[in-house]
């Protein structure tokens, strides 16, 4: 076989993929460059008051100091802060003993005050989806104990007309972040709001309960899937508990084994004394 000269313009070889470690480093450099460009164009701002901060997705020192975080001791059932704790086992407030809710346990990041309200309203009404990830991560930490034995997350649903107007469900956005942090699936289809209700703002406790009575139900296709499962219902805020209770009762009637609740903020009565 005679030797043939190699063509002057040999076909170019395909570029080899960089090693995995190098590829990871390159992606990290790319993300840092992109973040730097964004920070130049849009300097990081406080999630609540829009004051300048060092890192995106955080609170300024003033808002952080005014956010009333809920930490132990707190009522194991309601998740409300207690002025002091004593003894062994679960601490229960008088409210939890006198009028126990439909849910098993509730957990919240903070009490519902000015800063918490600003964050929730920004997410819900101002399309600030950028603050859903940091809020969701805070919720995952606050609810670590109830998430540890849960099997799925269920966001409080919006009626289809309100969802069409708002374009997204803030509870589902938070649940998605929490699910990623806790390694839990989000099952938005297991609960639906079948009747449109008026906004709860401005209604007293009795009117809120009447407003959401019969508004929530589990679709037939979800009943077999959720039967016997331990669920965590996710919402942005817990005030009188009317909406939460209506959702929990619908899930329990459909066969859920246990339903706990995780919110970003809740109205709390710090005057409750603990009963162990």
Image: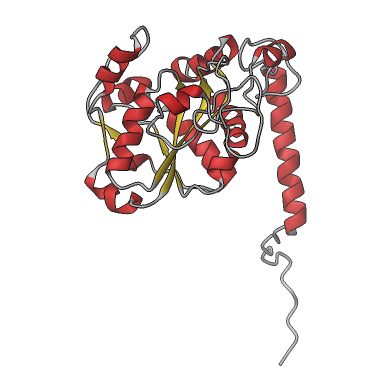
Foreground: 213 or 123?
A: 213
**From where the camera sits, is residue 170 visible?**
no
Residue 89, image quadrant: top right
Residue at the bottom extreme? 1
User: Residue 82: image x %, image y %?
Assistant: 60, 22
User: Residue 244: image x %, image y %?
Assistant: 38, 28
Name which residue lies at 73% across and 50% down: 24
Task: Give the left or right position of residue 170, taking residue 226 as reference.
Answer: right
Count the numbered circles shown.
Answer: 0
Task: Give the left or right position of residue 256, taking residue 87 as reference.
Answer: left
Foreground: 208 or 73?
A: 73
User: Residue 83: image x %, image y %?
Assistant: 64, 19
**From where the camera sits, is residue 187 visible?**
yes
Reply above or below: 1 against 179: below
Reply above or below: 4 against 93: below
Name which residue lies at 53% across and 17% down: 268
Foreground: 264 or 11?
A: 264
In this picture the colour scheme is secondary structure
Name which residue lies at 35% across and 46% down: 256
Task: Give the left or right position of residue 11, taking residue 159 as reference.
Answer: right
Residue at the top extreme? 202
Foreground: 176 or 5?
A: 176
């Amino acid at each position: 076989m005679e030797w043939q000269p190699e063509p002057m313009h040999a076909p170019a070889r395909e570029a080899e993929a960089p090693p995995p470690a190098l590829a990871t480093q390159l992606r990290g450099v790319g993300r840092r460059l992109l973040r730097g460009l964004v920070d130049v164009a849009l300097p990081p701002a406080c999630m609540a008051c829009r004051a300048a901060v060092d890192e995106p997705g955080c609170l300024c020192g003033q808002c952080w100091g005014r956010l009333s975080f809920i930490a132990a001791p707190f009522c194991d059932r309601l998740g409300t802060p207690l002025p002091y704790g004593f003894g062994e086992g679960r601490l229960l407030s008088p409210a939890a003993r006198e009028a126990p809710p439909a849910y098993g346990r509730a957990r919240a990041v903070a009490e519902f005050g000015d800063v918490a309200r600003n964050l929730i309203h920004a997410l819900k009404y101002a399309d600030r989806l950028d603050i859903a990830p940091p809020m969701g991560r805070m919720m995952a930490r606050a609810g670590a104990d109830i998430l540890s034995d849960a099997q799925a997350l269920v966001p409080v649903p919006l009626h289809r007309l309100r969802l069409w107007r708002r374009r997204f469900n803030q509870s589902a956005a938070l649940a998605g972040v929490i699910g990623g942090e806790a390694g839990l699936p989000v099952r938005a289809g297991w609960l639906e709001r079948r009747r449109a209700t008026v906004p709860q703002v401005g209604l007293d406790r009795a009117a809120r309960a009447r407003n959401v009575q019969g508004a929530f139900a589990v679709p037939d296709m979800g009943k077999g899937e959720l039967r016997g499962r331990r669920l965590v219902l996710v919402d942005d805020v817990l005030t009188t508990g009317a909406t939460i209770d209506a959702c929990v009762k619908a899930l329990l009637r459909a066969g859920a084994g246990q339903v706990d609740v995780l919110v970003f903020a809740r109205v709390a009565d710090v005057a409750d004394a603990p009963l162990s």
